[in-house]
Amino acid sequence: MKEVPSKWRLVKFSDLFDGLQYGFTASANQTPGADGPRFLRITDIQDYTVDWSTVPTCDTLDEEISRYYLQDDDFVFARTGSIEKTWRVRNCPSNAVFASYLIRGRLRDRRLAPWVSYFLRSQAYLSQVFKAAAGIGRSNVNATSIASFVMPIAPLSEQGYIIASIETDFSRIDAAVVSLKRAKANVKRARASVLKAAVEGRLVPTEAALARAEGRDYEPASTLLTRFLTERRTRWAESGGRGKYKEPASPDIRGTSRLPEGWTWASMDALAHVVGGITKDSKQTSGRSVPYLRVANVQRGRLDLAEVKTIVAPEPKIEALRLEIGDILLNEGGDRDKLGRGWIWRGELPECIHQNHVFRARLWLRAFDSRYLSHYANTQGDSYFLDQGKQTTNLASISLSKVKALPIALPPAAEINRILAEVDRRLSVLDALDATLDANLARCAKLRQSILKRAFEGRLVRPGAPALSAPQLPLFTEEAAP
């Protein structure tokens, strides 16, 4: 850390805090109204704040529980995982304790709490945390490391002015962030509105209306569906199908709205071959390692391939589940509102398969643009999956048969092409706007850090302020005495 201004002090955390205490080991009790102390965990700390109403309680008969009580102006530090998380305890209940993955620091002089709180948000603090982090595959920081951190302490008279300056600037940034996030929410709603209009026949003129206006015939969706069904039967015959051909699942259209002229209803089973993926098996050692997609990779309207894991699978399984360009991916399990979400495989990896919690739908007519079906599943299909999914204690799931039976409003082929072109045009505008909003949010974050950097380098000091001594820790001056 750079040299501090005259009359400031560089202080170790070991001198700043009266001991650093590891947290309490217990299990959280999520039962509403349960007795016991509030049990603060790392996950309860979000953006340097805590909503005590959502913090669970814990059951304990430990006679040493008083060692773990929290009070206002204590500081808690995450010691594993999200090690950047800290919090100045505020509005503390009378009997709140902290979990074992947190470390509590209690200031020797509580008047320093606002100053320390802002420093813990600064890059000067974060760089020390991440430098001290250790652990294989998971970041960890311990009390010994935290005790060795240093921070600058300004005289108390200067702290008030500097903190006021920070808060004034931060309040302006907060207002900007609120506006930017509101705009992002509007973009999200606009995107959903575009997709909903697309699959309801309201985004572009229907093929039937254009044909009438132009005095020509057109191919209705029923003809397109017939081509799908013919190809489906042909594929079955070519695969050496035995026994009687099984007709596709019929869509249940009870309660659905009337379709635009020229459209028709079809099930996913009539349009695509839907299969489940590979099940993880730790005992599977024969075969070779290949990338595979998990639920986390398959988002609504996009694929997140930042982390693609591998799995050992036998060659026949790899061949059967290898993804091809245009395949539609739909999630089988997870949170209930995420059932059926997905997107299109575009050949992002040379070879990839999918796990059993991700369905693959491969169109019978490969020349058909599969994006329309994926858009439909992500919009109109959402309520279907919510209704047809099954819920267990922690997870929801949708069966293969239910995915096959998904009712799809199918437009004429020519209309689908125009729909997708208009969707692409409008979403490209919204995506550009969203990227601009994200860039401005990133600028706000950088601006916060710039303000904090200036503050803790002594460049926000009030002009003409008298030079007063900084607190001497752990031996305090009269000005900073407790």
Image (spheres, rainbow, N blue to C red):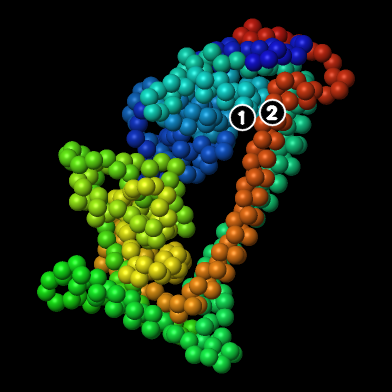
Q: Residue at x 35, y 31 (%)?
A: 26
> Is 81 placed left or right of 318 in the picture?
right
- Disc 2 marks which amino acid? Leu
Q: Residue at x 65, y 38 (%)?
A: 445
Question: Callout 2: helix, strand or loop?
Answer: helix
Question: Callout 1: helix, strand or loop?
Answer: loop
Q: Quadrant of the N terminus?
A: top right
- Disc 1 marks which amino acid? Arg
Residue nearer the viewer, 397 or 421: 421
> Where, by quadrant of the figure, is residue 209 drawn?
bottom right
Q: Quadrant of the C terminus?
A: top right
| Location of residue 269 in the rendering, given as x and y in whole percent from the top left corner | 30, 71
> Which numbered dot is residue 312?
none
> Which numbered dot is residue 121?
1
**Which residue is the site of mark 2?**
452
Q: Are marks 2 and 1 in contact (CB under 8 Å)?
A: yes
Q: Residue at x 24, y 74 (%)?
A: 234
Mark 2, Cα crowd under 10 Å, few <14 / some 14-19 / many 20+, is many
Distance from the alpha carbon under mark 2 to that under mark 1: 8 Å
| Location of residue 441 in the rendering, given as x and y in whole percent from the top left corner | 65, 44
